[in-house]
Image (cartoon, coloured by chain):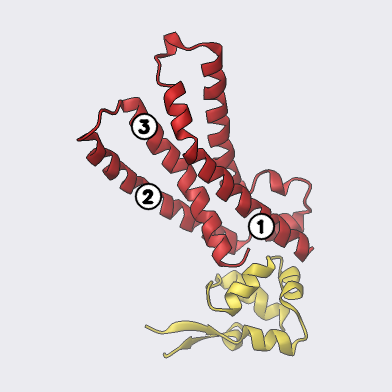
Chain colours: A yellow, B red
Amino acid sequence: MPELATRLRERRTAAGLTQAELAERIGVSRKTVNTVENGVFVPSTILALKLARALKTTVEDLFYLDGA
Amino acid sequence: MTDEIDRTSRRRRILLATYGTLFLAFQELYFSRLDAPFAAWRPIEYVWATLYVAWSATLIYVLATGGLPFRRRSPEAHRALNDELTEANRRFAYRAGYWMLLGSILLIYVLSRFTDWTVGEALRLLFAFGVAMPAVAFAGKERKQGA
């Protein structure tokens, strides 16, 4: 079964943001950003959209199915 | 603000782990004090019973809402402390509590074959597991995620 993979860390560092700064922008804890980046936590559609908007990219760019 | 959220989140985790574990550990104390029929209770038994109810309610309340550590926080901090990862951890905790409660029922049933347990004792132990285990499970999950 394909798993959710993410480019969140790459996109965040490219945008020059720390986990804390990104977390503050979208109103979640730093731990939430950290767990999404590490693939521990699968975000909801709403959170994925917020992350994409904060990083000025698309959800499809941030997340993809690994092994699909 | 992030530091404040990290600190508060850590405080909540430690509070739930400590109070949840102590709640289970103190059951023996309550067992010996509250087993008499209500008619034979002295004022001190009512004090113990009130403490027991207050302790249970605090654990349930803190797990469900974050409780006292949220006081005086800004709405942004409140939202971040209660974000969807926290909600997911709460769901995990309630699920874990459900399975542990089922396990406890089975365990008490097996033990009741060998020892004399009153209905009151069994119910009180089940209640204690139902209250404490989700709190401890939540704290464990948060710790694993680095809270």
Residue at 28% x, 43% y: name it. B107
Q: Position of residue A41 (x, y in %)?
A: 53, 71
Name the chain under label 3. B
Q: Specify which label sits upstream in the sequence, 2 or 3.
A: 2
Q: Which residue is mark 1?
A: B10
Q: Position of residue A66 (x, y in %)?
A: 46, 88
User: Amino acid type of disc 1?
Assistant: Arg
Quarter of the figure with residue B59: top right
Q: Which residue is mark 2?
A: B100
Q: How many marks?
A: 3
User: Amino acid type of disc 2?
Assistant: Met
Q: CA distance from mark 2 to mark 3?
A: 15 Å
What number is the disc on residue B123?
3
Q: Is residue B135 left or right of residue A8?
A: left
Q: Specify which label sits upstream in the sequence, 2 or 1.
A: 1
User: Amino acid type of disc 3?
Assistant: Leu
Q: Is residue B90 visible?
A: no
For the residues labelled 3 and 1, say whether their Cβ atoms are less than 8 Å apart.
Answer: no
Helix, strand or loop at mark 2:
helix
Whether callout 3 and callout 1 share a subunit is answered yes
Quarter of the figure with residue B126: top left
Residue at 44% x, 82% y: name it. A3
Whether callout 2 and callout 1 share a subunit is answered yes
